[in-house]
Amino acid sequence: MYHRDQVPVLSPAEVLNKLMEGNRRFAADAPRSADVSASRRTSLVPAQHPLAAILTCSDSRVAPEILFDQGLGDLFVVRVAGNVADNMVLGSLEYAVAHLQVPLLMVLGHDHCGAVTAACAHEGQTNEGAVSHVLNAIQPAIARAASHLQAQGVEAPPSVDAVVLENVVYTMGVVQKNPLIHEAAESGALLVVGAVYGLLSGLVTVVEPRPTADA
């Protein structure tokens, strides 16, 4: 059961604005000096109070603290190839929401995603090894992207970046179905958003809310 025992310094919308402002600084090659000082480390020893929780890809080019121009202790980050959500990921996000009481939870994908590329290449095939869990988790996003194309009369397979977008939307649906996270969002204490990072531009684009009934 979700219960907020403290009033956040910033509202969910204010936190999102803060992150997007930081991303614009990063993309403009004008980041501030993020606080990673010894005094900051010392202040964080008793407890952490991150601004937001971010579920994103393990890709080495996608580091949220850098992309959003944030310092030590500002973000609670869960990284897994393809930014998919299994029970261990959901458990980590539950901790961020229930115990750290973050006001913002973001699912962050990125273009040219290797995990999505591999999932598209192996669609319909039997995948071996632990990586199969990642590739299989992305299959619903491929089906969603293909369905959108078919509705437009297009029979070609969806592009990787189209699947990246659908994967963010699908994963948001999985996350939002978690009872604790759902309760926090319904109370207004938590905002769940999706976004896609552009490797070349450096910009993060927030995904417009869409139905996620099949998640």
Image (spheres, grey):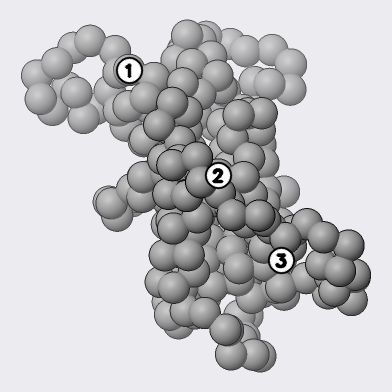
Q: Indicate which disc, 2 or 1, sits on the residue closer to the N terminus.
A: 2
Q: Which residue is mark 1?
A: 159
Give the structural element (helix, strand or loop) at label 1: loop
- Disc 3 vs disc 2: which is toward the camera? 2
Residue at mark 3 to residue at mark 2: CA–CA distance: 23 Å
Task: Tell me the quarter of the picture where residue 50 sits.
Answer: bottom right
Q: Whole-percent x and y of residue 68?
A: 54, 51
Residue 56 falls left or right of residue 129: left
Q: Which residue is mark 2?
A: 67
Give the structural element (helix, strand or loop) at label 3: helix
Q: Whole-percent x and y of residue 100?
A: 70, 73
At 56% across and 31% down in the image, what residue appears?
82
Give the structural element (helix, strand or loop) at label 2: helix
Give residue 95's mark: 3
Residue at mark 3 to residue at mark 1: CA–CA distance: 35 Å
In this view, 82 is above or below 189: above
- Amino acid at the residue labelled 3: Tyr
Residue 73 falls left or right of residue 168: right
Q: Whole-percent x and y of residue 53?
A: 61, 59
Residue 124 falls left or right of residue 163: right
- Amino acid at the residue labelled 2: Leu
Give residue 14's mark: none
- Amino acid at the residue labelled 1: Ser
Question: Which quadrant is home to the N terminus?
Answer: bottom right
Q: Is residue 142 visible?
A: no
In contact (CB < 8 Å): disc 3 and disc 1? no
Choose between 124 and 10: the one closer to the eye. Answer: 10
Q: Residues within 10 Å of mark 3 (few under 14, many from 20)?
A: some
